[in-house]
Image (spheres, rainbow, N blue to C red):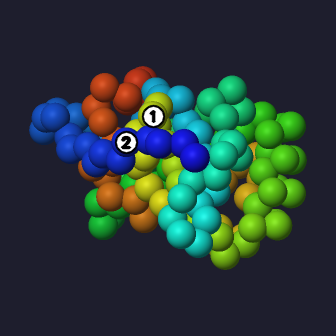
Amino acid sequence: MIKMKKKKYGLASAAALYLMSSSALAIECELSAYLVDDEGELGSSAIINPADVKNMSWSQDDESLATWRIELTEEAGEQLLEHSKAHIGQSMALFCDAEEIERMRIMAPLGAKFMIKGLPQDVIHPDRLSNLIQIK
């Protein structure tokens, strides 16, 4: 079993909040994901590893909830598609570095590009935000 800390973050400044409105920001952290069993324990190996991630960004919606956009390598996307098909209905835990930021249920197969909607914006630590990227 892998032990990880769970910690929620808050925004450090009004300036950071201003930058977040209506734009997408790149997230600088090592993303990983683990399946969660029925007892709430993490799986022994990651289903997404930091090396699998090509791009990761987020934006805020009108209700102050975050939408994460994650793009994996082609090979990792194919593996996640097969893995998620086999585990629909099971929970998955997302980590930035060694800190758990969210648990969610797999509702449909996931591929190389997917979004996670409805996260509170305070799960993003300002130190992990990099350059401002406009959504086209």
Q: Which quadrant of the figure has residue 65?
A: bottom left
Mark 1 and mark 2: Cα distance apart in space: 7 Å
Image position of 39 with respect to 5: above or below: below
Up-down relation of residue 109 to residue 72 (above or below): below
- Which amino acid, mark 1? Ala
Disc on the earlier residue, 1 or 2: 2
Front residue of 70/21: it is 70
Residue for point 69% across, 26% down: 51
Among the 4 quarters of the image, the one containing residue 75: top right
Q: Which mark is residue 98?
A: 1
Instruction: Identify the residue at the far front of this view.
Output: 1
Q: Nearer the viewer, residue 27 or 42?
A: 42
Q: Residue at x 47, y 31 (%)?
A: 97
Mark 2, other Cα within 10 Å: few <14 / some 14–19 / many ≥20:
few
Could you tell me residue 25's position as x and y percent?
43, 36
Number of numbered discs: 2
- Tag 1–tag 2 contact (CB < 8 Å): yes
Tell me which residue sits at (84%, 37%) in the image.
Answer: 74
- Residue 11 in the image: x percent, y percent? 20, 40
Give the numbered dot on residue 133: none
The residue wearing badge 2 is 5
Q: Position of residue 58 (x, y in %)?
A: 46, 45
Q: Nearer the viewer, residue 24 or 97?
A: 97
Of the 4 image quadrants, the one containing the C terminus is top right
